[in-house]
Image (cartoon, rainbow, N blue to C red):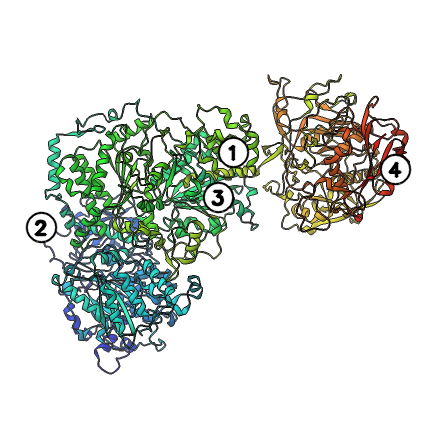
Amino acid sequence: MGNSYAGQLKSARFEEALHNSIEASLRSSGGDPQPIFTQLYLEPEAYPADVKSKADMPLQGEEGHDPLNGHASNDPEELEDDDDSDSSSPPLPYLQTPAPDGSCTLDGIISRGFCQAGKDLRLVTIAAEPIEVPAGFELVGAKSPSIPEHILVCAVDRRFLPDENGKNALLGFSGNCVGCGEKGFRYFTEFSNHINLKLSTQPKKQKHLKYYLVKNSQGALCKGPLICWKDSKTRQFSSSALTSKPSSSSSLSSKENGGASGHSSSPFSLSDSPPTRMAQASSVFFGSQDLGRDCSFLKPLASTPSHKTLPIVPTALRVNGPTNGLGVDVHTSLLSPSQVSLVPQAQGYRTPDLGDSPVSSPMNSGPPKKRHRSWHPSALVPVPPTAVPVPAIRPIVNSPGSVLAVSSPQSLAAGVIQPQPVTAGETVIVPENLLNSSGVRPVILIGHGTLPYFYGSVGNIVVSPLLVSCYKSSQLTESNLETLGLHSNQMLSVEMMILLTLQYLARLASNQIPLREELEQIVLKAMLGCPGNPAISPSQLPWLARLEASVSGGSVQVVVTHNSLGEGISESLHSLSEGPQHQQHLPTYVVIICASKINGNEFCVLVLGKYQARALAEGMLTTNEFLKEISYELITGKVTVLASHFKTTSLGDNLDKQLVRYQRRRKGQVIQPYQGDVTENTNSQEPASMSPPPDSAELLNRIFQIYPAQLTVARSLLSQVCSIADSGTQNLDLGRFCKVDFLVLVPPSHILVHQTAQRIRQSGVLVDLGNEDTSTAHQKSEKYVVRLDADVHTKMEAFMKKVKQNPYTLFVLIHDNSHVDLTSALSGSVCHGELQGLADRVVNCQEVLDAMNLLVLQVSCFPYTLQTHQSRISIHNEIHWPSNNHLQREQPHNELVYFGLRDYSCSLQWGVASPILRCDDAFEKMVHTLLERHPHLHSMVIRSYLLIQQYTEAMMALTSSPSLRDHITPETLAMVEDLINAPSREGSQGRGHMLLVRVPSLQLAMLARERLEDVRDKLGLQLCFAVMLGSPASELSLSRNFINILRAWRGCENEEWVPHTYEDLEGLPCIIILTGKDPLGETFPRSLKYTDLRLIDSSYLTRTALEQEVGLACTYVSVDVVQESKTSTAPRESDGEKTTPTLNDGEELERPQSNGSAATRTSGSLVENGVSSSDLADSFQKPSTSTSQPECLVTSDVATLTEGFKQECDSLGSQLSSNPLKAPNAPRSNYSSSSSSSPSPSSSSTQRPSQSTQFGRVSKSSRVSPRTVILSRAAYNLLSGESGSQLSSFSLLPHADVSWSSPLRPLITQNLQGADQSLYYRQWTVARQHHADYEAPPVLHPRRLLLSGPPQVGKTGAYLQFLRILFRMLIRLLEVDVYDDDDEEDEEEETTDVTTPANTQWPDIEDIRKLPFDLNPRDPKFRKASPVYSDKMPKLFKVEFKKEGDNQTQGKRVTKSIRLSRFAAHNAFHHCEQCHLYSEAVPTTQLSECSLHAFSFCSSMLGEEVQLQFFIPKAKEQHFVFNHQGSHLESLRLPLVSTKAHDLLKSPIFTPTTGRQEHGLLNLFHAMEGATHLHILVVKQFEMPHYRKYWPNHILLVLPAMFNSAGVGAARFMIKELSYHNLELERNRQEEQGVKRQDVWPFIVMMDDSCVLWNTYQPTDGSEKSNGSSAIINVSLKAVLQHLESTPKIPLYAMCGVRKWSSSLAHKTPRNPFSRCHLHDFVLLNVDLTQNVQYDLNRYDCEEVDFNLRVNSSGLLLCRFNNFFLMKKHIPVGGNKDFVVKPKLVEIENKAPISPPQYVCAPDSEQTLLDAPAQFLLENFLQSCSHRLFPKAVQNRNNPVLSIDSYLSLSPEISVCYINSRPHSTNLNHQGLVFSGLLLYLCDSFVVSGLLKNFRFLKGATLCVICQDRSSLRQTIVRLELEDEWQFRLRDEFQTANCSEDRPLYFLTGRHV
């Protein structure tokens, strides 16, 4: 962090004494050195003069200057660390010795104290002048060491200065020059140059900005307080420190020593200036926590396994084993070569990986890196070998077994370290000017064993741990060995590893570099292949090694030494430095083997190949580091040599002069676009007139479609969300949400924000979610997309506030491209101008993790970094994009298919003439030549300059200088030619191609754009194509004439329109120079033809880095292009040119207005098509079908469609409509995306999800070809995959932020995709220390999902569709399917004399009495029941009859989806603020607070005492009367008939319910508008605990155990019996209080548990609508009940009820507001009047019809209020419907279902007995098989079956005539009626033989007598004298198929004679 100086060493004397002690021990031949502490405390002098080492003398440069520190050592203030350099300021080559004070600078004019513009900056001269200080800036005084007497005035941005505590200064610098007024210096280096500070060290703001400047009383500027850079205390060092050498830190920080050093000593590797290094070394020796301020940002490293650390010392470098030095972004190896100042090297190369070390790169994208300053080479004198400085502690060399582990040499307990002399053989002096003399900076690949110390120009070598993990197989864990199929005895010996390494290096091609993953696979194969592991003797090894090397043709050389590795390294380096004469046959690799008898065999590899050494060194840098290095090279002018090389053309002419000459020759004319030849036109030509004529320019239509793959993925996401909700972990409660809201987080790219916002707009999702209305959605879409930049926190705060305030909204936080920045917030900082760690701060913050109404969806094309061992996402919550072959079964030729990374790799086998994946070998050759010439520059700088020259010369070759053609690579020339000429080709209509050039470095990209634009303009091509910089940090900028052309193409009237996304540039010929660290997921238009990735080389050696670059080219292409190519028909060039689809008269496709919001708001949207809103939920996402197709096709098979996807809230409307001709097959397609495989022509041609901007019409002939990708050789080798000789890209380390968890692992294959690949990475990779998941909690986050799919495949569309169907599902949870059967009544509406006006509110009792009772139950729920005979029966049956046993499979009832209103009844899943106290248990009120009360009464019907149990919650006790003790329940309180109150509901509501504790609609809070009411649930005893659990606040009435298997008849019977008994008790109680008995309210409400909504006609002013229809509105249950209860003379009615709703009711008002007919489902029952009429307690079905018929025949009034409607919800579970009939004794082998004919059997037969109640079996048998019992009655309405005293359903084919046997009962006039059968069911004593004599029967009519047992059956036949008229046979006696203990019913059949 550069400015925070925590933990600075305070004691200079301590360090000095320590070093003197070490120094002395090295010098002395014998005798112990004086103990350090004695020196420290006893020496009187602060600076002993005699301790200067003689060896140091020559190191002193010019007097007063320390050549290492480079500034005057006598200035105590300047002696601060050199180390805190502001990391964003690139260092300069500052190593020249300063010129004498006052001398002129280079230009010979400007003196010190003046800026480069010659303006005075000295405080003394400008103190009184007015100085303009911008807002936020401060005036500060800078000190220059060259003019110490002066203070220079500067204006500095306050943010980069510390506060009074010395903290909070931002890294970096921003300042203005107050002299000349130049603004915007971003680097202090640059600024110090400008103000001529003339420093010999690297400039630092901390060192040179000293004072604040303030105004005195006279208004003049004067010196103010010191700037409080933290801890800027004077620190002095003795120069003796410079040569002393710390021990290898590894010896101390090893695991064995228990981490005595406190921190890992990796700070060594980051420390810079020598004095601090010494200080740190000493602190580490003593386990001090104080690591020097330089390392304050290393705190996170405290936990690192520290055996990998490495100290870096200026003049001596010790490398011991794999070092963190590289992993920590550290510079173990690369101390900057002074003569080059190559900073990334100076800054150290990061290893791509450290093997098993999770910390191998903990900081690589973390804090800015410190730079290693180097020292001037002239000051370094080679030290004679006898006087080599050596380490004070000698590390113990490890046994070969534990490769490279380090042990602590000795106990540290003594407190004083005993230095030991070491031999000179273990040190290597790196020769000076190695890089300059040999042109190569050697890379040492650590192998096995101990590397030597390095001294001298250590910046000239690089130490890389690249391959070290391959040699660590001994560290494999048991479980890993098992996974790999290895045993511990199969480990390879060191000798075998040496030979394998040699073999591997020998077979590498000259343009390949070693890859860790490749060597690991070789090692693994060797281990698996040779279990014997042949022993190789020491004498054999050199011979075998040389043999292996001999096959390499001299590229691999073996050096064998016998003392140490250092000997071989030293020898090789010296021969290298001896100059060109040895360069002829330089080997690429030198394998140095030390065959030491003591230590066993050790080895390392010295890489000397120029290409390989550079590639390995550059590959060790992180992207951030090499970008920083490039910007440093550009700023410091290191590239001037290269730039001057490119000032001439390939022919040797001066480039600029040639261009100017050509420009003059053109005389201001420009080349007119769209013409084939070069036509001259004046500049002033109106650009608009150059666009093609309007009639040929078709408009580009915006359409947004959802494609089958996107729909599939959206559904997978939805189903995963549902499974999270269903998991029972309470992590997500979908039932409580009624709204969906979202926020999309995108990487910091303006274009990506616009692109995503555009997708949101086009998809209409905001309107569909109801978040915005149509008018505002367009403007507001941007606020749903947030960039992860500095402003993200305020936006996230606002979002999280919304999340907290709306607990009933489900929020989805979508983190798009989530792989882009996964740096931990701890290590995040400003790095290369980018904020890092923001995503971690946002997505992983505690608020987001804890919010129960927030889902996090991470979306990524390269999810590998999210799939580590520490991943926060459950593998079950990963959704993977279906692969192409899942979706492409048989696709028409004009359809588009996705063409991705794998297809590019496979395309290399196509064998076509012009491959789409190419490597530009000519370019690579040029690069090679230049790389050799410029070893000091980063290869990307060289590649960039060459690339710019190639494009420049290509433009010139095509316009002014044809002779240059031969000097341009064919690839470049073809691309530029295509760019310029495509718009003028026939049929192109002026549209051209886009060429994308990827230049990761912003500075190089700006340079490229500037240069290409300049050349283009000078050549007169400015109207032909645009050159644009595509930077994430800026908006697109395009000149007005191109904008006008785009507007003309789009038909855009808006003058203000400018392109915001790359897709807006469709058809525009342009070069886009795409810059930025990573591509961020922007979509490119279809006109992108070429992707130039020639700059992407060996710095991109992780899978994500490489694949995301090639991902830029992925897109959807025509399926026939791919198929043709695969069959090796090389596409002609013209095909390639026609990739831009030409527009002809196809069918128009437009996105219709989104009616989605209407669909969710109104109850029956889209009804006009006959499809309910739930079924066409997605219909509004498709483009409307074109006019050429008749509309009716869309609904062609609606009946079959309506079923398919009831479970899933989104339907396949999009497929239904895109494939109208196949609609009959739609149900099949509901379950797959198969119907989409052949959509209608209208949509097929634009099947391309990721591109939302499509051509409105695409001719069938137009083809979209894959884009051409041009790669560097390194990238090409990896992408060509298995076809090449190297591994393919998918075998690489998946991401720079992760590391392999094991040295060896199974090979990843191309077939490993989706979940398998995720499992692989989760097992074999771990997050590095700076990764956001490094410290992830072990528990996976339950509400986090990961959507992964290839780049540009259409993930945005998929997640927007997911939001839509998620909302539809939540709405479906808020919607109900209600029965919607057409009412049969109105067809046969009775015509009577009585007509009541339609708007009458209450019935007149006299009028009702005059109405006839309609005997037939007309409700559709009784469609399967027998019709009841009446005078007005229709003569024809309307039922389609089924064969026996089919009744279960008959067509289901029609339902319709209705949005719940605020008056709905709800089930247990409903939660809301208002009713949670009503339905949910409050934690304080436990179940025990319910009191259990027994209530007994005598039932005359049952003839015994019945005991019921009541569970009464405390809150409901006021509804009951208890005795004085309060324990005995006496009665249920009833109000009086006369009581009137506004909110009073008089009738208690009883709901019989079974099997529906969750699904029953038992929450009446909203239906009652919150009014107090009495609601009693009537439940079976065995279900009581379930109902108590779900409904703790409800009163439960528990039926006796004998009714556990009974039907609903028993519940109704008990409710009525109890209510009558209670009425009597209340009458008695209230009579004592003076109330008349008849005044007590006699009504109860009996209501089903599926009643959901109540409606009525809208009260009108008497005028109906013209068509006679009226509006229906929702009303509450409370309003309905109060209306019924206030009926005049209500006690005279036996029953009141309401009508059943159907959608047809809206179209017709009833002729009569009241009817006398059957009432059911919701009944107001007068228990007083109906005292003698009982429900049949045995019944399972039709008990209400049976009861209604008896009530009516008893002369009582039933009245239905026709202006009220009840909606009943379709509940598929419970309610006795799911009763399964199974055998009593389970026969395993009998799997066949039991059909109704098997429900009865002959008495005492052997038939299978069933486990079901007898009554249930009987009712089902009669329902299904009555045609056997009553053959004469089938479909014979004139001769019904006579049923006495009961109604049983005999199937809809058989009519029943009901007769009541009671005296005085009202019966149908049966005179003249002849019956076809007689049914006597459990008849009682009122049925006598005389009664039966009154009826006439057909000849052959049948009789069925049903009784409880055989004896009563016989008695009945005798008593009724049936044998007189009916003939019986013995075999006609049956029983229900129960065993005797289940009390079967018996029946006898006979025929009428």
Q: Are marks 1 and 4 in contact (CB under 8 Å)?
A: no
Q: Using the rendered image of the protein, determine whether residue 425 is visible from the camera's viewpoint.
A: yes
Q: Nearer the viewer, mark 2 or mark 1?
A: 1
The residue under label 2 is: 108
**Quadrant of residue 585 in the image?**
bottom left
C-alpha separation, residue under disc 1 versus residue under disc 4: 59 Å
Earlier residue among tags 3 and 4: 3
Q: Which residue is mark 4?
A: 1916
- Which residue is disc 3 drawn over? 717
Q: Do callouts 3 and 4 mark residues in contact (Cβ within 8 Å)?
A: no
Q: 1664 or 1947, which lies in front?
A: 1947
For marks 3 and 4, give the one nearer the viewer: 4
Residue picked out by circle 1: 1226
Front-most of 538 and 933?
Answer: 538
Is residue 611 toward the left or the right of residue 1322 in the image? left
Disc nearer the start of the sequence (4/2): 2
Amino acid type, callout 1: Ala
User: How far separated are the C-alphas under marks 1 and 3?
Assistant: 23 Å
Q: Position of residue 1280 (x, y in %)?
A: 31, 49
Give the Cα separation between the discs numbered 4 and 2.
Answer: 137 Å
State which tag comes first along the sequence, 2 or 1. 2
Label 3 and label 2: CA atoms lie apart by: 71 Å
Q: Residue at x 60, y 18 (%)?
A: 1665
Relative to 133, is 1410 on the left or the right? right
Please tell me whether mark 1 or mark 3 is closer to you in this view.
1
